[in-house]
Structure formats: structure tokens, C-alpha cells
């Protein structure tokens, strides 16, 4: 692990543990040894020492001479906190990248409603935004091969890869004429 540049995992580990947050809060008030942290927060010494060592590793706290001895006095490292937070915030937010042949409106809708992995984050309201819903359905129907007959179970499995609202999306695809089906629901296919 690169000790010069804390990564996202370090940030999450440092900030998602309640005991580490209490230690950081305590050190904002005054420097303290591992023994003092353990006593004040009611932690076993070993736990306090391990938390302080990790926080020192990611740069959130520092001790005199950078040591890890049991008698070291730890203090908050504001520069380390800033660096860790900035590294976390500066990471680019991944988003879905639509196919380049799509028009700008379709690209915008897909980026808005899809997760980075291409699954559907949110289904647009088909009554208020029928054009957005149609773009999502056109995207979804691409998972089906024209001319291939599917069982309802196979259709559900394909749709589930995109969203948990399987029956709603299956019905929307049929209502939009993007999927056809036998009257009894025994066969589905994508019209050519």
C-alpha cells in the first residue's frame, strides 16, 4: 500500500469506524498517548494503540518522531486530514458511458438513469416523462436478440440484470411494442 498517497479504502476505513472517529474527536481537543486514549474512551489499550497506528499510517495523526512506542504522544495532523479528504473528493465519480451513435438527449437520459455498470438506477415515470422511459426501454431491449424466442423466466433473468422491477419493466417492454408475447405469456420475442 502506498503510504505517500492514501487511497479511497484508507479514507473509508479511517472514517467509518466509530472508535477511530472518537479518537479523532479527542485529539482535536489535545494530544494524548495511547494509554490516555484507552482510559478516556474506555477502550482496551491494544485497540486504542492499533487505531492510533492505523490513523498514523494514513496520515490523520502523527506522533513525536513518528514512532509507534507505547509512550508516544499522538496529535491530530490537519494536513493529513485535508490530504485524505481531498484525495477522496477529487476522485472522479464513475458514470455510465452511452454508445457514441446515440443522440445527445438519449445519452443524457442514460447517464442520468443508469449506474456505472449499466444497470438501471432509477426508472423514469412513464406518464410524466414518456420520452425518457422510451429511451430506457430502447436501451433495455438491446439485451434481447431479434428472432430468438424466450420463456418468461428467461426474460425475467435478463431484465433482473438491469433492475429488480422485473414484472413492471417486462410489461412496459410489451406495452411499448418492443417485446411481443403469446397471449398466455409462454413465449416472448423481440420483433424484427
Image (cartoon, rainbow, N blue to C red):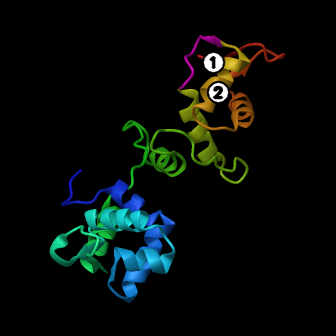
Give the answer, above or below, for where 166 lies relative to 81.
above
Residue 35 locus on image (x, y percent)? 38, 76
> Which residue is under mark 2?
178
Label ID, residue 191: 1
Give the answer, above or below, for where 127 lies relative to 151.
below
**Residue that lies at the very extreme toward the bottom in this rendered image:** 29
Q: Quadrant of residue 103?
A: top left
Total numbered labels placed on residues in the image: 2
Give the answer, above or below, for where 97 lies relative to 73.
above
Label 2 Cα crowd, 10 Å radius (few <14 / some 14-19 / many 20+): many
Per the image, label 1 sits on a secondary structure element best described as loop
Label ID, residue 38: none
Give the overall secondary structure of the magenta segment: loop
Q: 100 or 20: nearer the eye?
A: 20
Per the image, label 2 sits on a secondary structure element best described as loop
Residue 138 locus on image (x, y percent)? 57, 34
Residue positioned 36% across, 66% down in the render: 49
Which range is magenta? Answer: 143-149
Q: Is residue 133 left or right of residue 109?
A: right
Q: Is residue 182 visible?
A: yes
Residue positioned 64% across, 49% down in the render: 124
Amino acid at each position: 500500500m502506498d503510504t505517500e498517497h492514501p487511497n479511497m479504502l484508507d479514507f473509508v476505513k479511517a472514517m467509518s469506524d466509530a472508535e477511530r472517529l472518537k479518537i479523532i474527536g479527542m485529539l482535536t481537543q489535545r494530544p494524548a498517548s495511547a494509554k490516555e486514549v484507552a482510559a478516556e474512551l474506555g477502550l482496551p489499550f491494544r485497540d486504542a494503540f492499533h487505531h492510533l497506528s492505523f490513523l498514523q499510517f494514513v496520515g490523520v495523526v502523527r506522533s513525536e518522531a513518528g514512532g509507534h512506542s507505547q509512550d508516544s504522544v499522538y496529535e491530530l495532523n490537519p494536513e493529513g486530514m485535508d490530504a485524505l479528504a481531498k484525495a477522496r473528493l477529487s476522485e472522479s465519480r464513475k458514470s455510465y458511458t452511452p454508445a457514441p451513435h446515440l443522440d445527445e438527449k438519449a445519452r443524457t437520459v442514460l447517464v442520468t438513469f443508469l449506474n456505472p455498470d449499466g444497470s438501471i438506477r432509477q426508472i423514469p415515470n412513464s406518464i410524466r416523462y414518456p420520452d425518457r422511459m422510451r429511451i430506457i426501454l430502447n436501451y433495455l431491449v438491446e439485451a434481447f436478440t431479434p428472432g430468438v424466442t424466450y420463456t418468461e423466466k428467461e426474460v425475467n433473468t435478463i431484465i433482473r440484470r438491469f433492475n429488480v422491477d422485473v414484472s413492471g419493466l417486462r410489461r412496459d417492454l410489451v406495452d411499448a411494442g418492443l417485446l411481443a408475447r403469446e397471449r398466455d405469456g409462454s413465449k416472448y420475442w423481440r420483433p424484427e
